[in-house]
Image (cartoon, rainbow, N blue to C red):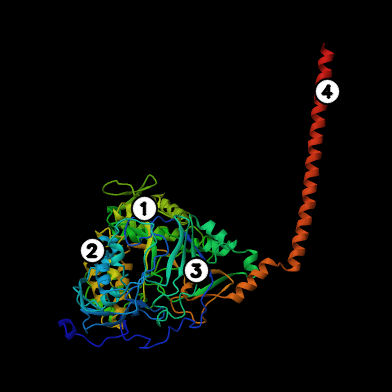
Amino acid sequence: MTAAATERTRPAHAIAMHGTPKYPPGFPHFDYVNPEAPKGGTLRVAVQGTFDSFNPFIPKGNAGAGSSYESLLTGSADEPFTQYGLIAESIEVPPDRSWAIFTLRPQARWHDGKPITVDDVIWSLETLKTKGQPFFRFYYGGVASAEQVGPRQVKFSFSDLGNRELPLIVGQLPILPKHYWESRDFESTTLEPPLGSGPYRVTDFEPGRYVVTERVTDYWGEDLPVNVGQNNFDRIRYDYYRDDTVIRQALKAGEIDFRMENQAKAWALDYDVPAVQRGWLNKEEIRHFSPTGMQAFVYNTRREIFSDRKVREALAYAFDFEWTNRNLFFGQYARTESYFSNSELAAAGLPEGRELNILDRFRERVPVELFHRPYQAPSTDGSGWPRENLARAFALLAEAGWVVRDMQLVNEETGQTFSFEILLVSPAFERIVLPFARNLKRLGINARVRLVDQSQYINRIRSFDFDMIVSGWGASESPGNEQRSYWTSAAASSPAASNYAGVSDPVIDELVELLINAPDRVSLVARARALDRVLLFGYYVIPQWHLRMQRVLYWDKFSRPEVTPRTGTSIDYWWFDEAKAARLDKARNERPQNADDESNSAVSLDTALGIIIVLGAIVIVMVRHRRARRKIVGQDRSAKAQR
């Protein structure tokens, strides 16, 4: 027995961030799937953009769909953060979670039939950290080493002691085939379909246009409890489009089958079509309870102009969410007032209990108002003229040393004018940003809106070359390691991180570490709320909005389970319904009699109108011809008379 083995606790089929897993050993399947779901059929989905590679793990190129790499563990959709065995049949961790040992399943195979080995696991970690996207170096930075401790056992040791999340994070590591990449350059883009280990493989593609994947009939993990009732389509086709408008037209024409709509205007106006009215194309709103995170106007506080907290607070009064929601979004959205919106992690009311105890430690180093009033985003009457809000903004700006001279806001001491750029990558946001810029102009602020292509946008973000962007951060029910990338001082200077706002505050650094090292769920909630509140009162962003619904459109040839998990539905659990598909085909090919009558009537009316228009045109031409002829004849007679 190895030295590592003497430290082992009992092997487990799953591991929860806090508490115990919902599903016990030997569970048959997740509650939110249909274990009897049939296999078969084709699913066609749209992807916006293009692709020129099948390597999604490097910063080069645009990776296409179809990569199918399994991980050691996989999550469930109805728990905050629990991971169950996938490639690994078990996991062992000590009470302090300073290491984790995974035992691989003997049946785990690559698509070429070769077994997935411990060597593959170790090579994957080392390669992703040294040659992969910068994210991997940051995310797996707390993993000190990986070593083989048995024929099918790999041990990860962690340098970030006290971080309960690390065993679960390592479990999410995509495992890559070492033998496949040994003869290839991992750091280069490639259009060779990848060797994977998952339920699908790429069988056809055309760069930039489409990718076709087919279900692997001898997939090694098909009967695992974590996979039962999932991966039900025989074939999935991904068609690439450069524009959302074209995608919507393709959906309505039946060229694609399924779409999650992301634009309020399109949801309200673009789908009042016969296919929806007849029930062929289903349009549904599905409630979910996932944290929606924070989407916002993000200040780059590295810029001197946004270094003052009062200035950042002031500019928030120029964003009229109520007018925007009413006039641009058809009232579909809720205002975001938390970095963990739509969850129990969101700070609400005044701090109390455990949260207050945490904040009391920093009382002298955090804004005093967070103890006396809850955070609330500025609101308006939605009229489009937020007079009171702008007055409040003027007062805050004056406190920060900015005054109006000659219709411009200038710094009272230096005379510098208040001017900045809002950098965009999506044209859809222009109509949202321009009214905000108009209100800023009323404050004497010149806010320029600039739209750039994706490559330029990414490069400017990585080099911190921006004043303000529209961006955000996702959230999970169990936040942890990723928070370092979002908010810490170390992340503020790292292009690999996601600290777009440049937050650099020792208090926030400490709160992030407290959150990551929370010993139980109750502590996690209290620490998340404390972090949330300090971030909100730092005014690093101007919060925008969120949606508590999934806006789903799909042709009526699919079925899904009766149970919807808290996180909402996923196409992974759906299946092709042959009976529905047959009815749909029949309905589309055989139009109802009344529809034919209406169509014939419309055709007859169109024909009659066409005849009238043609006859009218002929009459007009004849009249003009006669007038012209009379004029010519008259001119000829006049000329003869003169002669």
Disc 4: CA contacts within 10 A as few (<14), some (14-19) or many (>=20): few
The residue that label 3 is drawn on is 235
Tell me the distance, in whole angstroms, between the alpha carbons under discs 4 and 1: 70 Å
Q: Which is nearer the eye, 374 or 603?
A: 603
Image location of residue 327, percent across then percent down: 53, 60
Q: Are marks 4 and 1 in contact (CB under 8 Å)?
A: no
Which residue sits at x=74%, y=61%? 599
Q: Amino acid at mark 2?
A: Ser
Disc 1: CA contacts within 10 A as few (<14), some (14-19) or many (>=20): some
Q: Earlier in the sequence, mark 4 or mark 2?
A: 2
Q: Which is nearer the eye, 314 or 66?
A: 66
The residue that label 4 is drawn on is 633
Of labels 2 and 3, the one closer to you:
3
Q: Earlier in the sequence, mark 1 or mark 2?
A: 1
Q: Amino acid at mark 3?
A: Arg
Tell me the distance, in whole angstroms, between the alpha carbons under discs 1 and 2: 23 Å
Q: Amino acid at mark 1?
A: Tyr
Q: Secondary structure at mark 4?
A: helix
Q: Amino acid at mark 4?
A: Val
Mark number, residue 511: none
Q: Earlier in the sequence, mark 2 or mark 3?
A: 3
Q: Quadrant of the C terminus?
A: top right
Residue 487 in view in this figure: no
Image location of residue 115, percent across then percent down: 32, 74
Image location of residue 34, percent across then percent down: 49, 82
Mark number, residue 489: 2
